[in-house]
Amino acid sequence: MTAIAEPTVQGAPPEKRGVGFVVSHPKVLAGISILALFALFTVLEPVLEATAWARQPQLYDPQFGFDSSMRHPSAPSATHWLGTSSLGRDVFSMFLHATRPTLLVALSSGLSIAVVSLLFGSIAAFRRGWVDGLVSHLSDAMVLLPAMLAVFVLGISRSDEEFGALHVGLSFGVLYGLGPAVATVRAAALTVVARPFMDAARVAGGGGTWIVTRHVLPHLYSHAAVQAMIGATGAVIADAFLSFRSAVGEDVGFGQMVYDGIVWSSFLSGIAATPWWIMLAGAGGITLLAAALYLIGVGLREALDPRSGGARSDQVDTRAFVGRLPDSNPAR
Amino acid sequence: MMPAADQDRPPRMPWFVSFLGRRLIWALITLFLFLTAVFFFMQVWVPYSWATQFLRFGFEPFDAARRAAGLDRPLPEQYAGFMLGLLRGDLGTSFNGGAVTDIIREALPVTLTVFIAGTIIGWIVGELLGRLGSWNRGPASGSVMATLGVLSATIFPPFLVFVLVRWLREPLLDAREAMGLPVDSLALWRGAVTGEPGALQPGDVRWLVALSLAAAVAAALVVRSYGRRHQLPLVEGLALPGMLLAAGIGIWLSGLGPHALDLLYRVDMTVTTGRGSPMLAMFGVVLISFGQVMLLMRAGMDAERSEDYVLTGRAKGLTERAVRDRHVARNVIAPVLAGSFLTFPTVLAGMIIVEFELEMAGISRVMFDAIEFQDIPVIMGVMVVLGLMGVAFRLVTDVTIAALDPRQRRGRA
C-alpha cells in the first residue's frame, strides 16, 4: 500500500503534463479521428448533393427518395452505396443526413454536463459545510435516476418539433450532470481545495469567485471533460432509442434505420433475406459515434488518473456522509 | 489482508454493524432526496398529465375522476400525499384503476433475477478479463480488449437483442429439450392457467428464484470476507459458486426445479411465441456490462504494476500469480467497484431496453406501456423501485469495498 499512503493526493498534477500528452494517448487519438470523420460526413452531404447526386436528386433524397428501377430493400450497389431501405430510400444519404442531429445531441449533452458538473462540483468543494452536504447527497440521489430513462419518459410519443435533438441533449445533460458527473467532479475538487496553493490564494486576499474561477476550475476541466464524453455516449444511445421507438414522420435517424431492418426481417423472417446493410449502417453509425466519445473519455481518464473509475475508493463518500473533509491540511 | 488496522478492535466484526448503520442513514437521506427529485421531475418537468390525455375535452365524468385521483389539489399537498403513501408502502393508483404496487409486484422478480445475475456475471467476467489482460500482454491484446470494452459499452441494445435472438434462440431451445423439460410448458402450469384456487403461480416461483439468488449472493459475500480474514483462499474462491450451487440445489429439492427452469425460458404465461427469455436477457446484460469493468480493471492494474511493492514481492520470490492476484488485483478492485457504481444508471437503462426488446413481462414493459398511456403513477412507481434497487446495489458495493479495504470501515469523523 505504499502508493496510496496519502489518500487524497492523485498522482502528479495533470495540468503539468500538457495537452500533447493527453492527445497522444492512443484511445483519445482514435476517438478524435472518428469524430473528425463524422464531422466530415456532415460536410459531405451538401457537397454530394451539389455534385454527384445533382443529376438524379430524387434517388438520393434522404426523406422522400425512391428508386423505381429496382425492388426494395436492395443490397449495396454502384448506384446505392449502402443499399436502399424498405421504403426505397438511399441508405447512404440517410446515414449522412442522420449524422447532424446526432452530433448535435452529443455536443449539447456534453456541454451541459460539463457546465452543470463544474458549477456544482466546484462550489460544493469550495464552500463545504451544508452546501457540500446537499450537493453530494443530491448527486448520490440523482445517480439513482438514470438520465436515459428520464429522457424516454420525456420524449416517447412526442413529435420531433416538441422534443428534438437539442431537447434530448440538454435534458440528458442536466440530469447526468447533476448525478454521476457532479459526484466525480466534486471528488476531484475536494483534492484541489486541499492543496497548499489554495492557502496562498487566500493569503493573497482573493475573493471566493476569483479563487474558484482562477485556481479551482482550471484543475477540474479535464475531469469534467471525461464526464462530458462518457455522458454524451449515453445521450447518443438514448437519442437513437427514441428515434428507434417513434419511427414515424419524416425525420431520419440512426435508430429508425435499425428499426426498419429489424421490422422487415421479423415480419418476413424466412421469406426475404435480412437487410443487414440498413441495420449495420444504423447500428454502426450509433456505435461508432458513441465509441468515439467513449474512447476520448476513457482515454482522458486513463491519462489523467489511471487507477480510478473517476472515483477513488478513498473519495467515495464516507467523507460526504460525515459531512466534512478529513483534516488534510492541519496547518490552517 | 491488513490485520494491523484492526488490532484495536475485537475480532467478531463489529465494524460491520456500525458501518452498515451509518450506510443505512446515508441511504435514507439519499432516498428522501431521490423521491423528492422523482416527484418534482414528473410533476413539473414532464409536460403531459392525465389532463392532457383525457381532460382537454372537458367531459364531466373525467373531472370527477380527476378529483377522485386527487389531481386538483395543490402541488405541496400532492407531494405530502405521495411521500406519506410511500411510508405505508403505497405507490398510488394507476390511471387504469389497479394498485401500482400490485402491477410492480407482478413484474419485479423477472427484472430482479436478470439484473442480479447479469451484473454479477458481467462483473466477474470483466474483472477476470481485465486482470489477465493486464498481465499477459500479447502484441494485439491491448487493442483487442479496448475494442471489445468500448463495443460493450456503446453497442445499440436493440441491435444487440436482434443478433442475440437470431443466433442464440435456437441453441437455447435445443438445450431446453436436452434437459428433459416438456415441450409444452402448459403441462407444468395447468393449475395456474385454468385458475384453480391454490395452484402454483409463476409469480411465486419467480419471487422464489429472485430472492434465493439475492440471498445466495449476500451469503457468499459474508463467507468470502470470512475466508479472506482467516486466510482460507479455498473458502474465499469457492464462496460465490458454492452459494449459487446451493441455491440451485435448494430450489431443485423443493420440487420446483422444472418450474424455475421453465420460467427461465418463458417470457410470460400468456405469450407463447415471445422472442426472448430471461436467459437471453441475462446474456445481453452481461454483454453490455462487462466492458466498462474490464477497461477500468485493466487500466488500474497497468498503473499499479509499476509500484514498489510489486518489486518487493517479486524479490521475495512470490510467484507472478500471487503478485497479480493477492497483491495488485486487491488494490485495484476496490476503486473499480466504487467506480462501477457510477455506471449503474447506464447498465440499468441498457437492461431496460434489452428487456423491452425481448418482450419480457418485466419492469420495462410496465414502464414503456405507462409512458405510452401517460400513466404517471405507474411511471413514478417504476422509478421509485429502480431507485430502491440502486440503493441496495450501492449498499452491497459499499459493504464489499469495506470488506476488502479496512480503511473504508471507519467514518472519518
Image (spheres, grey):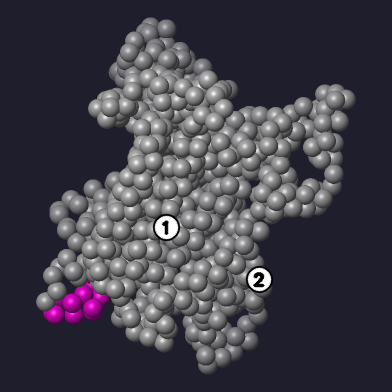
- Decide: few, some or many residues near mark 1? Use Cα within 10 Å; few <14, some 14-19, many ≥20: some
Q: Main secondary structure of the magenta part?
A: helix
Residue A319 lies left or right of residue A300; in this view the side is right
For the residues labelled 1 and 2, the Cα–Cα distance comes to 35 Å
Residue B318 lies left or right of residue A260; in this view the side is left
Q: Which residues are magenta?
A: B303-316
Q: Secondary structure at mark 1?
A: helix
Residue B60 placement: quadrant: top right
Q: Is residue B98 visible?
A: yes
Residue B298 at what x, y percent from top left? 28, 59
Q: Is residue A9 above or below residue B369?
A: below
Q: Amino acid at mark 1?
A: Ala
Q: Are marks 1 and 2 on the same chain?
A: no
Q: Quadrant of the image for the C terminus of chain B?
A: bottom right
Q: Residue at x 49, y 84 (%)?
A: A328
Q: Is residue B30 above or below residue A162?
A: below
Residue labelled with disc 1 = B218
Q: Residue furthest left?
A: B317
Residue A131 is marked as 2
Residue B305 lies left or right of residue A32; in this view the side is left
